[in-house]
Image (tube, rainbow, N blue to C red):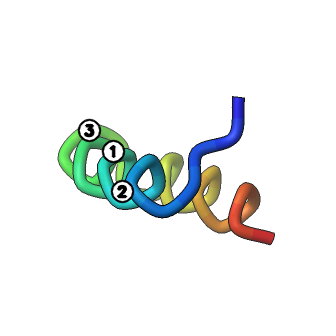
Amino acid sequence: MAYRLKGVQVEAVYCSDLKRARCTAEIIFRDQ
């Protein structure tokens, strides 16, 4: 279940509104 390109962008925006800190870490971790 790895999000890329569109997934990351959407998750970043969606999470940014919910739990930015937590989601940001997830996005960075997945990006790596």
Most distant residue in the right direction: 32
Marking on residue 18 = 3
Looking at the picture, how far across and down is residue 3, in whole percent?
A: 58, 45
Residue highlighted by disc 2:
12
Query: Label 3: few (<14), some or many (≥20) within 10 Å?
Result: few
Q: Quadrant of the N terminus?
A: top right
For the residues bearing labels 3 and 1, Cβ distance under 8 angstroms:
yes
Q: Residue at (58%, 58%) from the top-left corner?
A: 27
Q: Which numbered disc flags the more N-terminal residue, 2 or 3?
A: 2
Whether residue 17 sits left or right of residue 32 in the image: it is left
The three-letter code of the residue at mark 3 reads Leu
Secondary structure of the residue carrying tag 3 is: loop
Return the residue at label 1. Answer: 15
Residue 14 lies in quadrant: top left
Q: Position of residue 22 (x, y in %)?
A: 52, 48
Residue nearest the viewer, comparing 26 with 31:
31
Q: Residue at x 33, y 44 (%)?
A: 15
Mark 1 is on which residue type?
Answer: Cys
Hey, what amino acid is under mark 2?
A: Ala
Quarter holding residue 20: bottom left
* Residue 2 as seen in the image, left or right of residue 22: right
| Proximity of marks 2 and 1: CB atoms separated by less than 8 Å | yes
Give the residue drawn at x 38%, y 55%.
6
- Which mark is in front, 2 or 3? 2
**Badge 1: few (under 14), some or many (20 or more) residues near its Cα, within 10 Å?**
some
- Mark 3 to mark 1 CA distance (whole Å): 5 Å
